Amino acid sequence: MAAANGLVHASAKKPLFTFGVIADVQYADIPDGRSFLGVPRYYRHSISVLQRAVSTWNKQGNIKFSINFGDTIDGFCPKDKSLWAVQKVIDEFEKFDGPTYHMFGNHCLYNLPRSKLVALLKMPTDSDRAYYDFSPCPEYRFVVLDAYDFSALGWPHDHPVTAAALKLLDEKNPNTDKNSPDGLFGVDRRFLKFNGAVGKEQLSWLNDVLQDASDRRQNVILCSHLPMDPGAVYPAALMWNYDEVMAIVRRYNCVKACFAGHDHKGGYSVDSHGVHHRTLEAALECPPGTSAFGHIEVYPDKLLLVGSDGMADTEMCFRSSDRAAL
């Protein structure tokens, strides 16, 4: 259930824990502009949305951690200010009274190389890889995917991954401008340069993590910048190989929800296997004085997203037959 703010109320039960969420801050110290669809974008104001989010989470006092769903800065950010802009946003996240978990978005990769971003965003990995998992309590596991592991963004121009990704785009998208979906229909509109995929090594890792989570009888929350269900997003914003990722998810019953950013208007669906897909509304497109962020209360049998004015409340109840024995 997705609802206007105030229509979903906190459960009478106490949650296992609560965490904060925000997506697509896309900060840049430039005048306001518009998306290619003509939607206003408030580049300087977006950091104020983040500041309000952090202040709200701190005042609540029970937010265990926060998750930033990518696109920390905007692609229009002047390249000589990219490092400064990322650090400015990170400095705001560091005012939060808990850890923040980050992921890549396409706009991050327009500005800085992957290796530098992994270090700047302090991703908890033992290498340059940008995918990882963590468990805030014994009953739950969070899996953060790198949706641009296989993409034409962020890798050096002469890197094999770049060449392979461009080859795929040539095969799937006939347009000269690979960010144009003209002539593509349905979910094939996802084959655009600003999207990407989970690579083979990461797919294998994901399978291993979900197997381990199943063995431990943990519920899993999957996090990605790119959405993974056509019902929760317009087709041009889908992950290239969302079907491969979801095929792995469906081998197990542990994944209860997938959260994403990227499609700024947000979205919500429940797929045929009962997995909830929630695309989060963007901080970037909030007019001055408004916000889009929230917190998620985590229960053994459901998730409750409580949003600010620009982020819709959403109650996500698990199928009773699929609940882990917590």
Image (tube, rainbow, N blue to C red):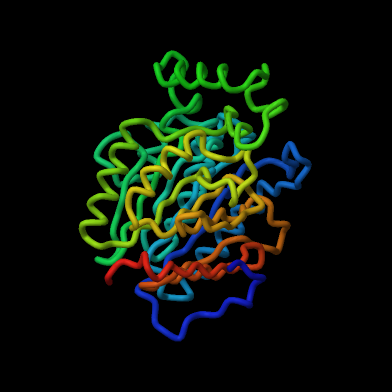
Determine whether 177 is above or below 13 in the image.
Answer: above
Point out the image quarter for the C terminus: bottom left
Q: Position of residue 165 (x, y in %)?
A: 48, 22
Residue 94 falls in image quadrant: bottom left
Does any portion of residue 55 appear in the rendered image?
no
Residue in the image at 47% along x and 67% along y: 296
What is the residue that sits farthest to the right in this orientation? 38
Residue 103 falls in image quadrant: top left
Left or right: 136, with 72 as reference point: left
* Labels in figure, total: 0
Q: Position of residue 37 (x, y in %)?
A: 76, 40
Left or right: 326, with 42 as reference point: left
Does any portion of residue 313 appear in the rendered image?
yes
Q: Nearer the viewer, residue 16 or 92?
A: 16
What is the residue that sits farthest to the bottom in this orientation? 12
Point out the image quarter for the N terminus: bottom right
Residue in the image at 70% along x and 63% along y: 289
Q: Nearer the viewer, residue 69 or 287?
A: 69
Residue 176 falls in image quadrant: top right
Determine whether 186 is above or below 122 in the image.
Answer: above
Residue in the image at 53% along x and 47% along y: 229
Q: Position of residue 251 (x, y in %)?
A: 33, 48
Q: Position of residue 23 (x, y in %)?
A: 55, 52
